[in-house]
Amino acid sequence: MAAYSMGGSCLVLLCLVFPVVLLAGAAHGHPWGGLFPQFYDHSCPQAKEIVRSVVAQAVARETRMAASLVRLHFHDCFVQGCDASLLLDNSSSIVSEKGSNPNSNSARGFEVIDEIKVALETDCPGTVSCADILALAARDSTVLVGGPYWDVPLGRRDSLGASIQGSNNDIPAPNNTLPTIVTKFRRQGLDVVDVVALSGAHTIGLSRCTSFRQRLYNQSGNGMADATLDASYASHLRQGCPRSGGDDNLFPLDFVSPARFDNFYFKNLLVGKGLLSSDEVLLTRSPETAALVKAYADDVDLFFQHFAQSMVKMGNISPLTGAQGEIRKNCRRLNGNHY
């Protein structure tokens, strides 16, 4: 539990986060839309510790895995809600979301989710959903690399299908305009604060050359680099991201502290050193988002508070509860299918 040791500032942060989340949930009749952190306290009391332990081992093996697991939760929740639809493999009845443009050759960490599921099925068979595993793993990953802690509302159930169309259409893309990004968030019940706060997850992790190449060579169709990209930083990026080839070459989204969850992502944006177009437009295309970028760059505690709140909001997108869906025994397939 050492990874969760919190100083006084984190405890204050929880006090700040908690009332806001409760109020937001209360507007829908009950906190968190029917989800609550104590959901497994009786049915699987070791659930949270099992998830945390496996995630800690995975992040110790490869720090990048923290960002990968946060991203899985994001890419799951934006398609049909937080229902683990992303985890389903192709089958006779399923076209997997893993083959979509945002996920193909990009989404990763599925083996860690498998490892968690095996451990949970051993301890409490048929009890903890894959959707809740994703939500807990995202929180644990954030904490393990220095980010904020939040209580994860639980009780989601797993989908009986997937939507590759939703995955292709609903997940914000690196080259989307800011209005398009905001619209995709609003469709999920998320607002502009959530857009900027959740973009701050790019303080960790890596991105492929293919996701930002256009900024280096042809941002506006005129054969010129993106004018909002720092020239020396662009020159550095071109060394590993040529005009053609090298699509899967990896670069840190936050070049200052790529393995630590902090607010350097926002500080980088202020000096033209955001990696993706979808990062830099937060500063350059809207006074409202720019004000939040500056606020988070100035105050890491404010960023952590807003990030935690926004992760809870995102985790509450259209969950399956009660008798809806199922609790998958294997996150990759529906219970009725054995291949």
Image: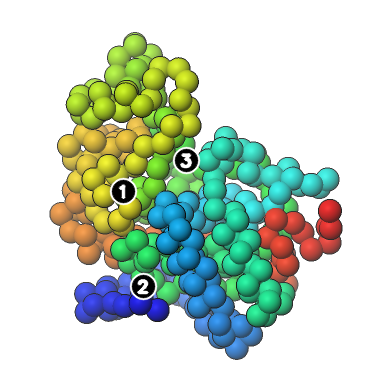
User: Do tag 3 and tag 2 residues touch (Cβ < 8 Å)?
Assistant: no
- Tell me how the rendering is colored: rainbow
Label number found at residue 258? 1
Numbered disc 3: secondary structure: loop
Q: CA distance from mark 2 to mark 1?
A: 19 Å
The disc labelled 2 sits on which kind of residue?
Ala
Label 1 or label 3, whichever comes before in sequence order: 3
Label 2 or label 1, whichever comes before in sequence order: 2
The disc labelled 1 sits on which kind of residue?
Pro
Q: Residues within 10 Å of mark 3 (few under 14, many from 20)?
A: many
User: Do tag 2 and tag 1 residues touch (Cβ < 8 Å)?
Assistant: no
Q: CA distance from mark 3 to mark 2?
A: 31 Å
Numbered disc 2: secondary structure: helix
Q: Residues within 10 Å of mark 2 (few under 14, many from 20)?
A: few
According to the image, label 2 marks what residue? 3
Label 3 or label 2, whichever comes before in sequence order: 2
Is 26 displayed left or right of 162 in the figure?
Answer: left
Q: Give coordinates of residue 130: x percent, y percent.
A: 63, 64
According to the image, label 3 marks what residue? 172
**Residue in the foreground of this view, choosing between 6 and 299:** 6
Determine the residue located farthest toward the front in the rendered image: 61
Q: Quadrant of the N terminus?
A: bottom left
